[in-house]
């Protein structure tokens, strides 16, 4: 374990989190922006619903951890909103239980530290045309159900005074969103990830949190000037690259 202690972000969720490094994913770019500022821990579990998330809260977020996260981003809902099967198997979670599970997750995260900030992502939309039927002959998921679970998540966050992002609405603002925002109708393409990233950065930039968790406002590790930094073209001075994000800081603002 490195000796210096950076702030810690944890991203906790299902497949959209686990696959967040794939295809210029939103987790990959977020990690790129915070590379010298924050340690980002990915806790993504494909196929999981909020019921399973509640079962592991004490393991993923132990209350006696020596360092508690500065930020936790949570996403569950897409699998919860799946159509129920007559067999009782599968990831479907009834809406009221889903709401209660989100409350349990938020309550647990609030108990970690007064300095732990929380951001929930609501259920994104999906492309109904790409969804295959389940063993009961019905669509495994529908965009209508995604909207219901998205709105439930947003309502929980309003009532618990937690920041949230309405992914169901944000993604559908993109032209041809059904075709360009997904790899398979459900999981995000690079275009879909760009929308998620933009929404997260907007929240972090606008939040009145002290200290700020927006990447441009956070110090870089070992940011002092050094004679060993790259030298300018005139050879008279050096360039401190500690806050430079490739290829251009303005690209990500």
Image (spheres, helix red, strand yellow):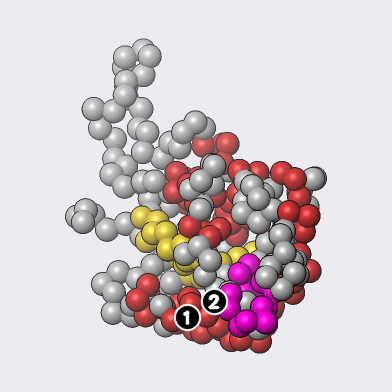
Specify the farthest residue to the top: 234
| Residue at image mark 1 | 54
Residue depicted at 36% across the width and 12% down the height: 234
Q: Quadrant of residue 63?
A: bottom left
Cα distance between the residues tagged 2 and 1:
6 Å
Q: Residues within 10 Å of mark 1 (few under 14, many from 20)?
A: some
Residue depicted at 56% across the width and 36% down the height: 250
Q: Position of residue 141 (x, y in %)?
A: 71, 67
Residue 55 sits inside the magenta stretch: no
Q: Residues within 10 Å of mark 2 (few under 14, many from 20)?
A: many
Does residue 71 lie above or below 90 as drawn? above
Does residue 127 lie above or below 246 as drawn? below
| Residue at image mark 2 | 50
- Image quarter where the N terminus lies is bottom left
Magenta span dominant secondary structure = loop
Residue depicted at 23% across the width and 27% down the height: 228
Does residue 218 lie above or below 100 as drawn? above
Please say if the residues under marks 2 and 1 sit with CB atoms less than 8 Å apart. yes
Element carrying mark 2: helix
Please name whichever residue, 6 or 144, is drawn nearer the observer in this view of the structure: 144
Q: Position of residue 66 (x, y in %)?
A: 26, 72
Q: Is residue 54 visible?
A: yes
Q: Position of residue 116 (x, y in %)?
A: 43, 72
Q: Which mark is residue 135?
A: none
Element carrying mark 1: helix
Q: Position of residue 239 (x, y in %)?
A: 36, 27
Horizontal relation, residue 230 to residue 1: left or right: right
């Amino acid at each position: 374990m490195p000796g210096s202690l950076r702030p810690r972000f944890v991203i906790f969720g299902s497949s959209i989190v686990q696959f967040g490094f794939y295809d210029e994913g939103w987790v990959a770019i977020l990690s790129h922006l915070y590379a010298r500022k924050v340690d980002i821990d990915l806790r993504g579990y494909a196929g999981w619903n909020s019921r399973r998330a509640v079962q592991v809260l004490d393991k993923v977020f132990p209350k006696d951890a020596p360092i508690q996260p500065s930020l936790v981003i949570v996403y569950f809902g897409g699998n919860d909103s799946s159509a129920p099967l007559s067999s009782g198997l599968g990831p479907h979670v009834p809406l009221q239980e889903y709401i209660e599970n989100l409350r349990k997750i938020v309550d647990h995260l609030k108990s970690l530290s007064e300095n732990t900030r929380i951001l929930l992502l609501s259920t994104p939309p999906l492309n109904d045309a790409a969804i295959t039927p389940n063993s009961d002959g019905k669509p495994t998921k529908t965009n209508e159900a995604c909207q219901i679970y998205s709105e439930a998540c947003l309502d929980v966050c309003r009532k618990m005074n937690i920041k949230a992002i309405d992914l169901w609405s944000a993604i559908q603002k993109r032209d041809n969103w059904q075709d360009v925002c997904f790899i398979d109708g459900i999981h995000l393409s690079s275009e879909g990830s760009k929308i998620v990233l933009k929404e997260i950065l907007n929240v972090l930039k606008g939040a009145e949190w002290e200290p700020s968790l927006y990447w441009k406002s956070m110090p870089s590790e070992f940011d002092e000037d050094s004679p060993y930094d790259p030298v300018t073209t005139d050879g008279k001075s050096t360039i401190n690259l500690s806050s430079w994000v490739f290829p251009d800081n303005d690209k990500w603002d």
